[in-house]
Amino acid sequence: MQEQLKTIVSECIKEAEKCTKEAEILEIKAKYLGKKSELFSLLASLKDMSVEDKKKYGSLLNKIKQELEQKINDCLEKINSKSKISFDPTLPIYEEYGSLHPITIVAKETTDILKRMGFTIVSGPEMEKEYYNFEALNIPSTHPARDMQDTYWLDNGLLLRTHTSPNQVRAMEKYGAPIKICAPGRCFRNEDLDASHENTFFQLEGMVIDENISISNLIYVMKGLLKEVFKQDVDVRLRPGFFPFVEPGFELDCSCLICHGKGCPTCKNSGWLELCPCGMIHPNVLEMSNIDTKKYTGFAFGLGLTRLAMMKYKIDDIRILNSGDLRFLKEFTGQED
Ligand code: DAH
């Protein structure tokens, strides 16, 4: 029996020392100390031994049992202490805070203002169906306006949305009229990159449909929005602009915030800054989404959030916004307050 016990001890120790995981060591414990172990049957056989043998082997077997238990507990403790992360409470706190991206800041600011005016924020997919991005916005496949927006077509038959306007259609489909929504979001166009062109940029779509909605409502909302964004009164003017989903369509300009209309390099001496395309929603668009055009009219606008952030923070190269350059982003720590 002595030989048998020696092998049990040496094998148990060898196997326990190899373990690297708690589950492994528990398996070893069951193998060498559990009810099906050799040691367990040896201990069980004590009761059939003579009194003398009982004395002799009883204490030996119990000693070995204790020795193996100790060994296994030591190994278990070693494994557990390795998996714990050591923590030094005396280390100084790393006081570096993250910051919001400038686009996130202006998106939050503008949508907060619109929310106070009663707009609901909605969103839609960046990977969009042709129907929502073009067709339902009165841009059939033969329409030359499709060329205005160089589209990324995907292998799965979808496209990367070229503007946030598909949100108009999705919202009309889902909620019907009357409706007052805004939708900030990322858009994509296959552009050659330079200081003022990016293939990935952000817009904020707005749409109001109700009875008796007219261009004056559009001007009122836009003036209110811009006054709060720029924290000063701004003049706005509308110039004709063409977009198939609005009729009439406009380009909304605001008085130059730098020279207040006197003329400067930023506004190219015109006194005006081009800010936001907009218009009265085309009846075809309303009809395609089952809105009763005898009862309802509406306006929509597509504010360029990227452009707005560039104006607000005087950023002269659009490419920095998507660069992930931390030195640039760090400048915005605390801006959101
Ligand atoms: N979706 C247009 C674009 O990205 C911008 C636009 C124009 C949006 C007129 C509108 C609108 O809602 O009424 O070029």
Image: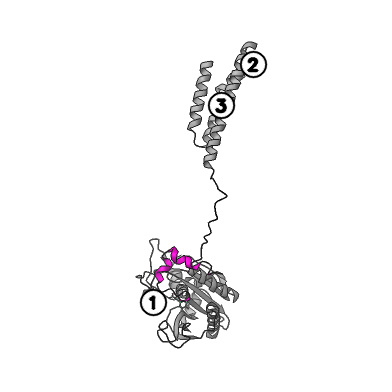
Count the numbered circles shown. 3
Cα–Cα gap, marks 3 and 1: 82 Å
| Pointer 2 residue | 47
The quadrant of the rendering that contains the N terminus is top right
Q: Quadrant of residue 190?
A: bottom left
Q: Nearer the viewer, mark 3 or mark 1?
A: 3
Magenta segment boundaries in residue numbering: 311-336
Name above or below for residue 111 compared with residue 36. below
Question: Is any atom of residue 332 visible in this view?
Answer: yes
Residue 161: image location, x then y, percent:
43, 68
Question: Is any atom of residue 50 visible in this view?
Answer: no
Graded by Cα atoms within 10 Å as few (under 14), some (14 to 19) or many (20 or more), the crowding at tag 2 reads few
| Pointer 3 residue | 68
The quadrant of the rendering that contains the C terminus is bottom right
Amino acid type at mark 2: Lys
Disc 2 or 3, which lies upstream in sequence? 2
The colour mode here is one colour
Amino acid type at mark 1: Ala
Residue 3: image location, x then y, percent:
51, 16
Graded by Cα atoms within 10 Å as few (under 14), some (14 to 19) or many (20 or more), the crowding at tag 1 reads some
Disc 3 or 1, which lies upstream in sequence? 3
| Pointer 1 residue | 145
Question: Image quadrant of ligand 1?
Answer: bottom left
